[in-house]
């Protein structure tokens, strides 16, 4: 019976080694998702708001709502 010796299993430091790997993976995943959110959601939203307010006219909107009878305290000009 020739038996080969099995290598001893590593019993110390397993948690530390696994934590290092998982912390690095979590850091990469969180940074990746933050970058994707910034350039996929936040930047287009900021551009859309800037475009909206660049071309908006609050008085024109007010007059349109006034004529439509939206406000109770302000009468339409035609009546």
Image (cartoon, rainbow, N blue to C red):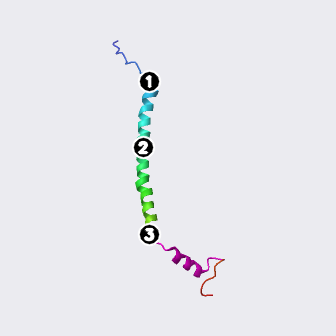
Q: Position of residue 36 (x, y in %)?
A: 41, 51
* C-alpha span from label 1 to label 3: 59 Å
Task: Please name the residue shown 41% across and 37% down the image.
Answer: 24
Q: Counting other residues with Cα less than 10 Å from the Cα at mark 1, is it few (<14), some (14-19), or many (20 or more)? A: few
Mark 3 or mark 2, whichever is nearer to me: 3
Q: Is residue 79 above or below residue 34?
A: below
Task: Please name the residue shown 47% across and 72% down the image.
Answer: 56
Label of residue 54 in the image: 3
Q: List the single residue furthest toward the right.
A: 73
Q: Is residue 13 above or below residue 56?
A: above
Q: Nearer the viewer, residue 59 or 8?
A: 59
Q: Counting other residues with Cα less than 10 Å from the Cα at mark 2, is it few (<14), some (14-19), or many (20 or more)? A: few
Q: Position of residue 58 (x, y in %)?
A: 52, 73
Q: Earlier in the sequence, mark 1 or mark 3?
A: 1
Q: Earlier in the sequence, mark 3 or mark 2?
A: 2
Residue on which the image places disc 1: 13
Quarter of the N terminus within the rendering: top left
State the extent of the magenta-drawn residues as a range: 52-72
């Amino acid at each position: 019976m020739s038996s080969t010796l099995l290598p001893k299993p590593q019993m110390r430091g397993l948690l530390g080694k696994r934590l290092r790997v998982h912390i690095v993976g979590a850091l990469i995943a969180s940074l990746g998702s933050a970058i994707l959110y910034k350039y996929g959601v936040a930047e287009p939203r900021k551009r859309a708001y800037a475009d909206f307010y660049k071309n908006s006219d609050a008085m024109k909107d007010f007059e349109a709502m006034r004529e439509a009878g939206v406000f109770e305290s302000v009468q339409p000009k035609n009546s």
